[in-house]
């Protein structure tokens, strides 16, 4: 079974630029999560989707971050404009609606200069 | 105050040692407790999953939860160099099947020396 796929793996941008990350969850997983992991810290949930609906986006900085999961499968996370403090690893995870485990992708490492 | 506090690393032990990793938490609503392992430049992977208080054993790994003290532990017996990774505790107020948010500790970096 293929795992959670993410791209790109690495991205370097300058502050005030925009960037987008893509996630393809495990086939059949209805729930998709985006986490931000700053160096030396644990992951922090940004947004959670159930199919194509948002379940929790309370920790998403909505003035600059947006995410969508239009067809209930793939998802994109966008930052516009980026700030220096957005430098982090962005992790995507998915879980089955009847399962109890979140499976994480390898993450996208973002550096904002 | 952070909801979840994890003992800071880094932790370096010789091969074969018993390793103890710990977290404390402040939110009494947490009922589900997990330990994730994260290798360098990889995503976290679930090691242990425990509901409420008690112990759970899986091979060389034992997870303990003491809800009265708001304290959880992960023990690794006969540690191996392949156990070298960052260990993250995580907690949620509801079961993951309901999609509840996971709150993670900051992680403890473990190195097992041959």
Image (cartoon, helix red, strand yellow):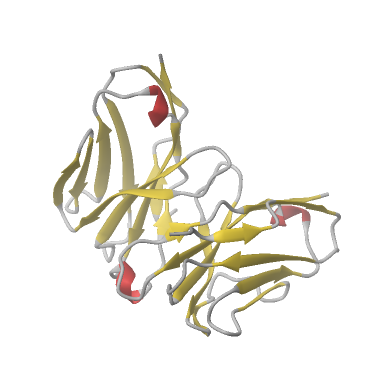
The residue at 26%/45% (across/down) is: B72
Q: Is residue A67 left or right of residue A13?
A: left
Q: Residue furthest left?
A: B54
Q: Position of residue B75 (x, y in %)?
A: 25, 34
| Residue depicted at 58% across the width and 42% down the height | B41
Residue A85 relative to residue B104: left or right: right
Name the residue: 47% across, 45% down: B106
Q: Position of residue B73 (x, y in %)?
A: 26, 40
User: Is any atom of residue A23 visible in this view?
Assistant: yes
From this viewpoint, is residue B1 visible?
no
Q: Is residue A30 above or below residue B69?
A: below
The image quadrant where one finds the N terminus of chain A is bottom left
| B54 or B43: nearer the viewer | B43
Residue B87 relative to residue A48: left or right: left
Q: Residue at x 86, y 55 (%)?
A: A14
In depth, the one of A23 and B38 nearer the eye is A23
| x then y, percent, for residue B1 | 44, 53
Q: How many marks?
A: 0
Residue B30 sits in quarter: bottom left
């Amino acid at each position: 079974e293929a795992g959670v796929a993410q791209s790109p793996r690495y991205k370097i941008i300058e502050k005030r630029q925009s960037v987008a990350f893509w996630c393809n969850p495990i086939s059949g997983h209805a729930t998709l999560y985006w986490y931000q992991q700053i160096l030396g810290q644990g992951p922090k949930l940004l947004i959670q989707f159930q199919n194509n609906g948002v379940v929790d986006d309370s920790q998403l900085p909505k003035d600059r971050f947006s995410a969508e999961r239009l067809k209930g499968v793939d998802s994109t996370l966008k930052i516009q404009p980026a700030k220096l403090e957005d430098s982090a690893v962005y992790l995507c995870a998915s879980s089955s609606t009847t399962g109890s485990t979140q499976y994480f992708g390898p993450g996208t490492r973002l550096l904002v200069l | 105050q952070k909801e979840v506090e994890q003992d800071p690393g880094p932790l370096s032990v010789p091969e074969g040692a018993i390793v103890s990793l710990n977290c404390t938490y402040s939110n009494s609503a947490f009922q589900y407790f997990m330990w994730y392992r994260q290798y360098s430049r990889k995503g976290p992977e679930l090691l242990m999953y425990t509901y409420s208080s008690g112990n759970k054993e899986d091979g060389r790994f034992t997870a303990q939860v003491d809800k009265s003290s708001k304290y959880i532990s992960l023990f690794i017996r006969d540690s191996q160099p392949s156990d070298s990774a960052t260990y993250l505790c995580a907690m949620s107020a509801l079961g993951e099947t309901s999609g509840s948010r996971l709150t993670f500790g900051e992680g403890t970096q473990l190195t097992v020396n041959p």
